[in-house]
Image (cartoon, rainbow, N blue to C red):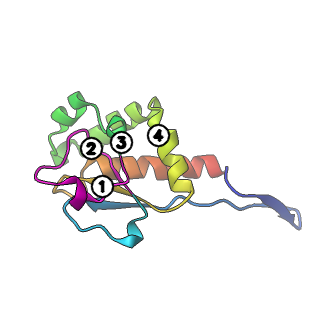
Amino acid sequence: MHGTGWRIGAQPVLLFNPIMIRLKRAYDPPSPADGQRILVERLWPRGMTKQRAGLDLWLKEIAPSPELRKWFAHDPAKWKQFQQRYWKELRDNPAVADLRDKAAHGTVTLIYAAKDEQHNGARALKDFLEKHSRKRAK
């Protein structure tokens, strides 16, 4: 848990720094509000130069496994099952702790290449981090 705790009356009050995670397509221009820009794809976005991407980090190892990515094929009908399978991969992934630590110290923007803004690995990763961050803060 991040932060400190104290008592007000009989109730303990816990303060913590909520993680701030944003999502952005690789093809959208960088912004100062992005904070740390982290590419969370195994494959480099097509046609994107390193300069134009404006990344702080390329975290390939946190992306869905090649087998899972190929199985999902960005099919919205497979979204729930994809999330479950990807979250299972993330539970054993040491890169999660590094990413969570970066997010606890400032804004992090997860950069992804998919056209579908609602059904992609970065969205599933953000949901995983936020859900598991809340559990740790309680």
In space, the residues marked 4 and 2 are separated at their CA atoms by 14 Å
Q: Quick check: marks 2 and 1 in contact, CB under 8 Å?
A: yes
Residue 130: within the magenta? no
Residue 41 shows which numbered tag?
2
Label 2 SS: loop
Q: Name the residue under label 3.
A: 59
Q: Is residue 70 above or below residue 116?
A: above
Residue 39: within the magenta? yes
- Tell which circle, 3 or 4, labels the residue nearer the N-terminal end: 3
- Residue visible at 25% across and 49% down in the picture: 120
Q: Tell me if 11 is positioned left or right of 129 in this view.
A: right
Q: Quick check: marks 1 and 3 in contact, CB under 8 Å?
A: no
- Tell which circle, 4 or 2, labels the residue nearer the N-terminal end: 2
**Mark 3 Cα-neighbour bin, 10 Å: few <14, some 14–19, many ≥20:** some
- Tell which circle, 4 or 1, labels the residue nearer the N-terminal end: 4
User: In the image, what residue type sits under mark 2?
Assistant: Glu
In space, the residues marked 3 and 4 are separated at their CA atoms by 10 Å
Q: Quick check: marks 4 and 2 in contact, CB under 8 Å?
A: no
Over which residues does the magenta segment extend? 37-57
Q: Which of marks 3 and 4 is in front?
A: 3
Give the x, y percent position of residue 61. 35, 35
Label 1 SS: strand
User: In the image, what residue type sits under mark 4?
Assistant: Val
User: In the image, what residue type sits under mark 1?
Assistant: Ile
